[in-house]
Amino acid sequence: MRGGLRGGLRGGLPLAAWAYVGGVVAVATALIVTGSFASLDWRALAVLAVLFLVCDSAPALLNVERARVTLSFSASLASVVLLGPLGAALIGACAVVTGQRILAPVKRLFNGAQFALSGYAAGMVFECFGGDRVRPGHSDWVEQSIGPFVGALVTFVVVNLLLITGVLLLSRQATWREMLREGAQLAPGFLGYGMFGLLIAGLWPAVNGFAAVLVLLPLFVARWAFEQTRAQQQAHGATLAALCQAVETKDYYTRGHSERVSRGSVMIAQEIGMRSDRVEAIRYAGMLHDVGKLGVPTKVLQKSGPLTEEELAAIQLHPMRGLEIVREIGFLDEALAGIMHHHERMSGRGYPMGLAGEEIPEFARVISVADAFDAMTSDRSYRGARSIEEAVAELRRCAGEDFDPMMVEAFVRALDSVGWDPPKPVTLPEDDVVETTQQDHDDPTVPLRVAGEVGRA
Amino acid sequence: MNSLEERPAHRHPGNLWQGLDTLQLLLVALAGLVVLVAVTRMTTASPADPEAAVVFGVLVALGELFRMVMPGNREVAPIATAGALGYALLDTVGGVPAHQSPLQVVAVVAIGMFAGSLPHFAVGGAPRLDEMARRLLIIALVALCFRPVADSGLGWGPVLVLMGCAVVASCFLDVTVAAVIRSGAVRARFGIVLRDEIGAKLPLCAATGATAMLIAVATSVMGLAALLIFTAPILVTQFAFRRYAGIRATYLQTVRALSRVTEVGGYVETGHSRRVSGLSVAMGRELGMSEEELLELEYAALMHDIGQLSLGDPIPGGATVLASPREQRRIAELGAEVIKQTGVLDRVAYIVERQCDPYRSADQPAPPLASRIIKAANAYDDLVGDSTDRDRGAAVLERLRLDSAAEYDPTVVEALGRAVDRHPVRF
């Protein structure tokens, strides 16, 4: 999109797309060639062109799969105000020589042409609304030009998105639905960065190109901070995963369990349309849900046969131990609730609190489904892994009683569309007698047994 | 002071003066005096251009309202600082010359800062007087130097150059004063603290300075309405830095919290990892480590026992100093293996890997400083535990001293002695 079709326009284009690209380029060229260059401010044009190219070559502020938003957007909008339609078109055409990466010539040509058209259209709208009658640098300039400017900005964004959508649709690289979603994601960024163009234009008469430095410096610093934030987020995620892995290394059968429960929880969360920050939180909650199991003495987990009351209590305490450990992390409270209540059941017979139905926090209802599913599809010392179909049937059988039917159905839908990699069969090291876990508290098909009672958990 | 990013943000209002040393008190007193003079002056003489004063005052107040804490427990208020600097640099408002005196600038900024701090007060967060005093005094200095220039009627060229100089100077003054205060508070060497301070603040300083000039120029050309839209870039910056500070804090919290899994699993005594990390950071400061190194040291110290998780059964009492050297080395290697899995903490992994190696050894190079620190801190904590008995601590120190030269680095053991002396209350 803006700043270029990044991965788009692969290989051979259909004829219709070639015709479309040709048409756009021809219109843009015609507009520029037939324009009158007499009143153009060549010095401002040169400075803005340099600014455009510098910003466009710098790493982007916002990246989506197919598009990038760079600060060159501000330069384009400033040129709309300062240079009028023709100047804006010329600045847009600079995208042909942009240095951001090695783009195929056809992409460069198309990008340049579509920016030129967007700039021209925005310039025309700005003039129509009377924006050009107030010269920048006067005391009431802000009040008078903000209306025309917003009109021009919206025009620029809309024309830009439509032209790109056209080429991606014709070359069958995107569907309408994808384009709408991506457009909605990008639009706020476009509009925001575009507004900075007004700031540059407003200061231009007083300090010329220095205006751009003053406006863009804080934004480049912000970009640096965003980059740092992303690096830290990745490091944080990796560290969390590594530590969770460390917690489960002792047990050959549950290795990777946290990671998979995290993945399953995210699948359900996305399927039921959770907000992205909540999805992030549930990713961590899923990863950390069993961290308290470390507080359960190893001999209890390795005991085969029925447990005593105390041993059962030790196992049932693990969500609370987990909560104790992670409470201090600056999490959403919801993630904590998810960790604490992931063994509650819809019928109210779970632990640690015995909550029932809707009382159980949403996160916990999500995690418990993914948790049980992974337990069933993994190898255990006392049985082999079940197939995905068997596990789904079991989840459905227990829906309503143990699991929230809505979450189970969401998970089944997600399994159909995304799929699932069950863990590899466990091969125990041969050299010595490995003590293995005999008790799996997550497995709904084999409830924990207490000596003297049957089938209780 | 046992951690890098501890936030004493919730000091109670009653303890406003607690924890301020002489230098900070001096700074606060000086700022108070300047404000007193400025406000008195404001009430006697009628202010120049009251409308601009009110608008800039509101901007500063809003900026103070949204101040934030950056990594390393540094309080910043980029919007307020940019607004205040902008007001000090302002030479006309929409073409009409502005004649605010330096004292008026100080008074407006001080009132704005006070108003913006009221909501913080209301929710129980005491303001950090020294940080506010520093910000205010720097504005006062810039105003004092720049107001005559602004009134002199120079053209845009020279004015811009002088503005740039004023902004850069204010940045350097800010980091220098902050470094002086910090080096007093954490007892670290000035040069190192200054470097840390510059590294931590420079990007934000650049953004704030540019915005201050932007505000001054825009308001001069286009009047006060420009202020509304010309603060937009710094808003984006503030948003970005707030997120950065948030994730940094969360990261540390996560490592701290998860370092406790060894306690919950019964591998080490309760509080061991945290005490070792607190002690290690204090020793690292004594030994002149930079902030970045201290953060790595803290991570490594928190996770130094993580390798025990891979052991079948906990070591009795969890004290690794009592385990056999082979076992110790095995735990260190397993721990390093876990940390290496993250793919981003390789240096931390190396520190953990070398944590039990002797200081002098015939067949391998000396372990890094951080490992030597953790080795000593770990031994001290294993032998003293959470006991607060000073004699016991002294006896353990004596034992470590006897072992030093071969097993422990003597300078590190000395630093341990000083750190323990300075914080008689256990970490």
Image (spheres, helix red, strand yellow):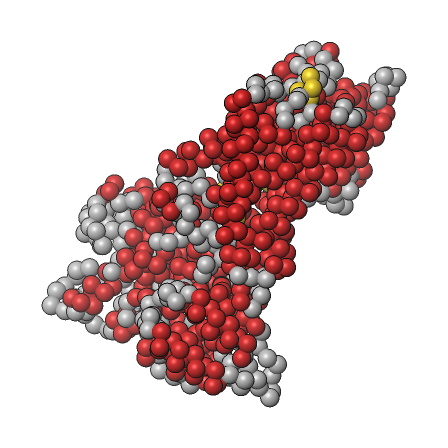
Judged left or right of residue A174, residue A295 is left
- Residue positioned 53% across, 39% down in the render: B31
Would you place residue B296 above or below residue A8 in this image? below
Q: Report whether residue A430 is seen.
A: no
**Quarter holding the N terminus of chain A?**
top right
Count of marks placed on residues? 0
- Indicate the quadrant where residue B259 lies: bottom left
Would you place residue A80 above or below residue A450 in this image? above
- Residue positioned 22% across, 54% down in the render: A351
Judged left or right of residue B78, residue A97 is right
Closer to the camera in the image, A414 or B159? B159
**Quarter holding the C terminus of chain A?**
bottom left
- Residue positioned 74% across, 42% down in the render: A57
Give the x, y percent position of residue B85. Answer: 62, 34
Give the x, y percent position of residue A38. Answer: 88, 17
Would you place residue A253 above or below residue A24 in this image? below
Furthest residue to the left? A452
Q: Report whether residue B185 is seen.
A: yes
Closer to the camera in the image, B119 or A417? B119
Closer to the camera in the image, B277 or A52? B277
Furthest residue to the right? A38
Judged left or right of residue A153, residue A108 is right
Give the x, y percent position of residue B309. Answer: 39, 71
Give the x, y percent position of residue A17. Answer: 71, 32
- Residue positioned 59% across, 29% down in the render: B103
